[in-house]
Image: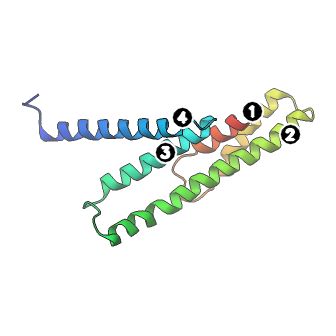
C-alpha cells in the first residue's frame, strides 16, 4: 500500500466518502415510508457532495457558499418538480386503473408517460427520480 501513487489514495478516499454520504442519506430517510424519499435524499446528497468536491477551493467564505447554493438550487428544485410530476401521473393513471383501465396498461403508461413529461424539465440531473416516484405511487 505504501507504494501506491497519491491519485489512488485520493480515489479510494473519495469513493469511501461517497459511500458514507449515500449510506447516511439512506439511513436518515429510512423511517419515512416509500422508496421515493430515499432516492431523493441519495441524489440530493450526492449532488451536494460532488459539487463541494468539484469546487476549486474549500468554501470558507459566505460568498463561496452562496455560489454553491446558486448552483444547487435549480437542480434540487427540478428534482422536486420531477417527483411531483411522477406523483401526478401515477395518481391519474391509478384513478383510471381503479375505474377500469387494465392494470398492465396502467403499469406501462405510468412510468412511460412520466418519462416523456419529465424529459423536458430544465436542470434535471436524472430522470430516474420521476420514474421511481411514478412506479412507487402507482
Q: Is residue 22 left or right of residue 60?
A: right
Give x and y (percent) for residue 113.
73, 43
> Looking at the image, which is closer to me, 50 or 61?
61
Residue for badge 4: 30
Q: Residue at x 63, y 44 (%)?
A: 130
Query: Dot 3: what SS?
Result: helix
Residue for badge 2: 95
80 over 92 or under it: above or below? below
Give x and y (percent) for residue 128.
58, 41
> Looking at the image, which is closer to me, 104 or 29?
29
Give x and y (percent) for residue 7.
17, 41
Mark 4: few/some/many CA within 10 Å (<14, 14-19, 20+): few
Q: Quadrant of residue 18?
A: top left
Residue for badge 1: 108
Q: Quadrant of residue 86?
A: top right
Q: Label for residue 134? A: none
The alpha-carbon separation of the residues under discs 1 and 3 comes to 25 Å
Furthest toward the left, the residue is 3
Furthest toward the bottom, the residue is 63
Which of the marked residues, 3 or 2, is nearer the chain's N terminus? Answer: 3
Query: Dot 1: what SS?
Result: helix
Can residue 119 be seen from the camera position used here?
no
Residue for badge 3: 43
Q: Nearer the viewer, mark 1 or mark 3?
A: 3
Which of the marked residues, 4 or 3, is nearer the chain's N terminus? Answer: 4
Which of the marked residues, 4 or 1, is nearer the chain's N terminus? Answer: 4
Mark 3: few/some/many CA within 10 Å (<14, 14-19, 20+): some
- Image quarter in which the C terminus is found: top right
Q: Residue at x 58, y 45 (%)?
A: 127
- The number of numbered badges drawn on the structure is 4
Amino acid at each position: 500500500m505504501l507504494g501506491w501513487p497519491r491519485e489512488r489514495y485520493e480515489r479510494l478516499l473519495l469513493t469511501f466518502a461517497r459511500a458514507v454520504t449515500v449510506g447516511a442519506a439512506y439511513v436518515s430517510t429510512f423511517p419515512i415510508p416509500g422508496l421515493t424519499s430515499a432516492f431523493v435524499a441519495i441524489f440530493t446528497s450526492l449532488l451536494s457532495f460532488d459539487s463541494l468536491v468539484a469546487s476549486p477551493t474549500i468554501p470558507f467564505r459566505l460568498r463561496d457558499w452562496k455560489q454553491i447554493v446558486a448552483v444547487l438550487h435549480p437542480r434540487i428544485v427540478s428534482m422536486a418538480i420531477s417527483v411531483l410530476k411522477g406523483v401526478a401521473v401515477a395518481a391519474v393513471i391509478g384513478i383510471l386503473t381503479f375505474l377500469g383501465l387494465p392494470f398492465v396498461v396502467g403499469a406501462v403508461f405510468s412510468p412511460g408517460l412520466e418519462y416523456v413529461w419529465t424529459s423536458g424539465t430544465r436542470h434535471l440531473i436524472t430522470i430516474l427520480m420521476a420514474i421511481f416516484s411514478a412506479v412507487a405511487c402507482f
